[in-house]
Image (cartoon, rainbow, N blue to C red):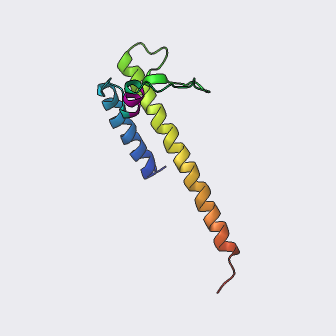
Amino acid sequence: MRIPWWVWALAAIVLVAGLLSPFASSLPDGLESVIERESVPVAERAQPSPLPDYQTPGARDERLGVFIAAAAGIIVVALVALAIGHLLARAAARSEDHDPPL
């Protein structure tokens, strides 16, 4: 069985991002720093994050926890993007089948 190119690409992205993410800055990002600096009131989250601040509950090592959280986020976003692309491709194929010839 031949593995599709996108599986290799996703694996490479997970590996690179997962290995580099533990070395990212611990300083707040731009939005968080502006909220803190301007004392903007922040409403409570309606839905808590499953992996807040890229920490994985139960991970023995902090870097491993960050790797797992980053990999999970990348995989979820990739799967959602692939699903949307698949649905759009199916919709486009259906619309081509139903278009009257000119």
Number of marks drawn:
0
Left of 80 or right of it: where is 96?
Answer: right
Q: Is residue 30 magenta?
A: no
Q: x%, y% of residue 52?
A: 48, 23
Q: x%, y% of residue 99?
A: 68, 77
At x 49% / y 44%, what residue is drawn?
Answer: 78
At x 45% / y 46%, what residue is drawn?
Answer: 7
At x 38% / y 30%, what residue is drawn?
Answer: 34
Q: x%, y% of residue 101?
A: 66, 84
Left of 91 or right of it: where is 12?
Answer: left
At x 44% / y 16%, what residue is drawn?
Answer: 59
Left of 64 or right of it: where is 73?
Answer: right
Quarter occupied by the C terminus: bottom right
Which residue, as the protein is rendered here, is positioned at the far bottom?
A: 102
User: Would you place residue 99 above or below residue 5 in this image?
Assistant: below
Is the stretch drawn in magenta largely helix, strand or loop?
A: helix
Image quadrant of residue 14? Answer: top left
> Start and end of the magenta stretch?
31-35
Nearer the observer, 34 or 23: 34
